[in-house]
Amino acid sequence: MRFRDLLIMSINNLRRRKFRTVLTVLGVVIGTASIVVMVSLGIGLNELTTEQIASYGSLTTIEVYSDARWGGYDSSDSSEPDYINDDVIEKLKKLPHVKGVSPVLSVYVLVRQGMYEANINIMGVSEDFLREIPIGEGELPTAKDKELRMVIGNQVITRFNNYKTGEGYWDTMELPDVDFMGKPLYVIFDMNAYWSSRQPQEGGNAVKPPKKYMVETAALAAGSVEDWNNYSYNIYVEIGLLEAQLRRIFKKQPIPDQPTNKKGKALPYLVYDSAQVFVEDMAYVTQVQELVSDMGYQAQSNMEWLEQSKQQSQMVQAVLGGIGAVSLFVAAIGIANTMMMSIYERTKEIGVMKVLGCDMKNIRDMFLLESGFIGFMGGVAGILLSLLISTVINQFAGGEALTGMAGDLSRIPLWLNLAALAFAVFVGMAAGFIPATRAMKLSPLAAIRNE
């Protein structure tokens, strides 16, 4: 008997018992929808967490720093501290799966515009780092620029105070009247001289205030003052131009916060606060991080948070999926019951088919197709129901309520729909296997005599 004939017979048998078929299909609908919705909540929670962590900074970036930079080493040791300098940057660039490395040099400065000022860090970074910053307005500075230009974080403006009244954004909840793109900022780099000039000196000799340098803004980071990320609170400049600016200002004097030799003189090289290593793909971040640690440096990345969050999300997803699977298991019992009742009602029909020479396997396949078709109909309807439930969940209980980030909490990818449909058909056929085998083994004569 052809497959098409078996399928038609199976569908006709189900149509003859519409009410029972509908009730059985309804059980599969509820079970399938439960699994899809529960798993979609786990997927949505996992993706929302990933998006939240990614919003803080790149998931393919590793921050590298040395304990020696801030005195975390034995000063009696005759060997040179493991500072992060240009030689270390070159070694990091040669690590496998690394597409770029940026040194990071922080300089504490005072910036002014009109009656507003802010004490802030200017971060010298490479062009690779600057390209990681989401830009809302303007264009990124480059090493080819003749003058120092800045990229302003989206929350930097909240750090400005009116130096006459001492009030700032957090006092008045009004943004200071600072025009980054329209007017340059005046920057004081020599903060030691600045503070000395403001203190009374013995003998009445005042310290000359340090020179102010006019620096233009090249770009503003994307986002409002309420959107926080790793780039929000700092000012960024190209590190080569920053180094040249510092050497012009301090000449042979030690640059503030730079380590010196035992005689108190400046080192012949620049010591960076840290380095940012940019990895080709998220899959290699952990591997590269281990290589950096083997070099003797501290390394951290957002992938550490992500891995921990994924483990928690997977546990939640497994629990939610298990709850949904229970519903489908109950539906499988209903399918098995329906098929057993169908066999008892059609015993004489089965006997006639056997006497007429119908292949035993065809009888078994007919009942398997019936149970599988129940699973298919229930799976399709269950997927449609799950899409409706998911829409309602996202409409009234989105991800913002749980994670603080806007986005759908329930997410149903295409593979989940296909997997749920396949699983529903499998459960249906598995539930019908024992009844189908029983039908195949019925004695023809006993079946014909059955009333």
Image (tube, grey):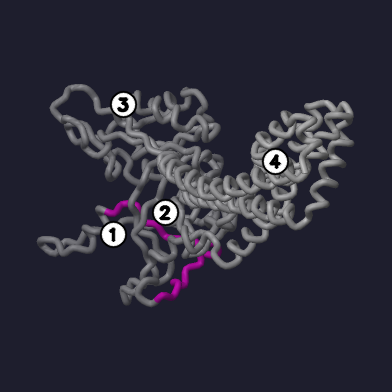
Which badge, 3 or 4, is on the more N-terminal residue?
3
Provide the major secondary structure of the magenta segment: loop
Mark 3 falls on what kind of element? loop
Q: Which residue is mark 3?
A: 296
Category of crowding for the residue at label 2, using alpha-carbon neighbours closer than 10 angstroms: few (below 14), some (14–19), many (at least 20): some
Q: Residue at x 21, y 31 (%)?
A: 261
> Marks 3 and 1: which is nearer the front?
3
The amino acid on which the numbered mark 4 sits, given as a three-letter code, is Val
Q: CA distance from mark 3 to mark 4?
A: 55 Å
Q: CA distance from mark 4 to mark 2?
A: 56 Å
Write down the region rendered in magenta.
Answer: 173-191
What mark, if any, has residue 209 been given in the picture? Answer: 1
Q: CA distance from mark 3 to mark 1?
A: 42 Å
Q: Tell me the quarter of the image containing the N terminus.
A: top right
The amino acid on which the numbered mark 3 sits, given as a three-letter code, is Gly
Q: Which residue is mark 4?
A: 425
Q: Which residue is mark 2?
A: 234
Q: Position of residue 420 (x, y in %)?
A: 65, 44
Category of crowding for the residue at label 4, using alpha-carbon neighbours closer than 10 angstroms: few (below 14), some (14–19), many (at least 20): many
Q: Is residue 180 visible?
A: no
Tally of marks:
4
The amino acid on which the numbered mark 1 sits, given as a three-letter code, is Pro
